[in-house]
């Protein structure tokens, strides 16, 4: 399946302001089931671009601006080929088929902070909630993860949330609602409390059921590491497992590390007028 992705962000200011460097994580992560065919980046005003890879291997562009401006537009266009199967079969190591299992010493060392919950868990409430999905010991590892992934839908309703940042998992459970990044953060900390290595993912979702012409959006989900199978995608917002219809751009320990565009300006709060984000993901 070949997909075309268009993503533009426009910032508007009341007067020309000095633009601070902006960190861009917008380009797809090529893998065995995602082939990046073409990419382009356009910024107005034109910046100096410095390219690097972060500790997770994400492609990061830093845009530095010499001139002041009352608008900033960052636009990318990408064409990718997504070939992940809709019904994947995961080759999990025999020793990890049943939960609980123990990661090897090497895996524990490499996973590091991806094993540690990010948010405080007052009185162990989140850990108890996660353990509620364990109906017996031992139990099937993949079935347990799928139960948590689909069970979140029954506890949390999706809602668009324009505020910056990510809710804590306990806030998401208390509110019984959250954005895709909030729902992904809940899943990640829940499975970390059960001893799994998990990481946050940002990118795009292709939804074939959306009518042609509707705008798309960026998306957030999670991945869990299982021996031999590697990183398995879990999208708790939609209750799906596997990478089909997902286009990852960045992975990290938490959502705050993988925001598509981060940056600022020199000036007062009243100088900022607004921001427009447009995303389109279409099959070609």
Image (cartoon, rainbow, N blue to C red):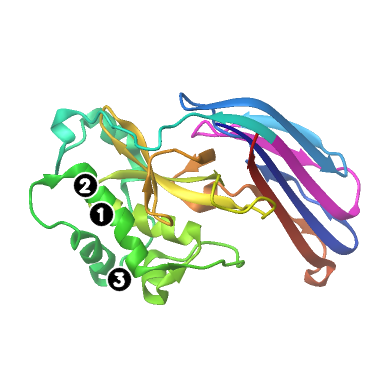
In the rendered structure, are the residues bearing label 2 and label 1 in contact, judged by CB atoms less than 8 Å apart?
Answer: yes
Residue 4, located in which quarter of the rendered image? Answer: top right
| Part of the protein shown in magenta | 53-77
Q: Position of residue 274 (x, y in %)?
A: 78, 65
| Residue receiving disc 3 | 122
Is residue 120 among what the camera can see? no
Mark 1 and mark 3 lie on one chain; the one further toward the N terminus is: 3
Look at the picture and state if 236 lies above or below 45: below
Q: Work out which quarter of the rendered image holds the N terminus and state it.
A: top right
In the image, taking residue 170 as reference, residue 218 lies left or right, namely right
Is residue 209 among what the camera can see? yes
| Residue receiving disc 1 | 147
Q: Of circles 1 and 3, which is in front?
A: 1
Residue at 21%, 31% in the rendered image: 104
Mark 2 and mark 3 lie on one chain; the one further toward the N terminus is: 3
Look at the picture and state if 149 lies above or below 1: below
Kindly state the secondary structure of the residue where label 2 is placed: helix
Residue 89, located in which quarter of the rendered image? Answer: top left
Q: Few, some or many C-alpha atoms within 10 Å of disc 2 (few <14, some 14-19, many ≥20)?
A: some
Kindly state the secondary structure of the residue where label 3 is placed: helix
Q: Few, some or many C-alpha atoms within 10 Å of disc 1 (few <14, some 14-19, many ≥20)?
A: some
Q: Of circles 2 and 3, which is in front?
A: 2
């Amino acid at each position: 399946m070949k997909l075309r992705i268009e993503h533009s962000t426009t910032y508007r200011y009341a007067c020309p302001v000095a633009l601070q460097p902006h960190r861009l994580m917008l380009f797809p992560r090529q893998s065995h089931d995602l082939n990046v065919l073409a990419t382009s980046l356009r910024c107005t005003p034109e910046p100096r671009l410095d390219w690097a890879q972060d500790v997770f291997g994400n492609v990061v562009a830093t845009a530095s601006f010499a001139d002041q401006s009352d608008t900033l537009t960052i636009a990318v266009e990408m064409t990718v080929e997504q070939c992940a199967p809709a019904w994947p079969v995961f080759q999990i190591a025999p020793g990890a088929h049943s939960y609980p299992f123990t990661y090897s010493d090497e895996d524990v060392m490499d996973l590091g902070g991806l094993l540690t919950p990010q948010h405080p868990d007052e009185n162990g409430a989140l850990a108890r909630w996660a353990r509620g999905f364990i109906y017996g010991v031992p139990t099937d590892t993949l079935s347990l993860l799928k139960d948590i992934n689909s069970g979140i839908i029954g506890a949390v309703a999706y809602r668009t949330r324009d505020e910056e940042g990510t809710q804590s998992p306990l806030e998401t459970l208390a509110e019984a609602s959250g954005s895709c990044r909030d729902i992904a953060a809940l899943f990640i900390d829940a499975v970390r409390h059960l001893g799994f290595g998990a990481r946050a993912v940002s990118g795009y979702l292709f939804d074939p059921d959306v009518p042609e012409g509707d705008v798309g959006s960026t998306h957030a989900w999670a991945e869990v590491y299982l021996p031999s199978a590697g990183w398995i995608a879990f999208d708790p917002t939609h209750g799906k497992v596997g990478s089909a219809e997902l286009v990852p751009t960045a992975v990290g320990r938490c959502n705050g590390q993988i925001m598509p565009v981060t940056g600022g300006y020199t000036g007062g709060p009243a100088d900022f007028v607004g921001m427009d984000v447009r995303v389109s993901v279409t099959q070609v």
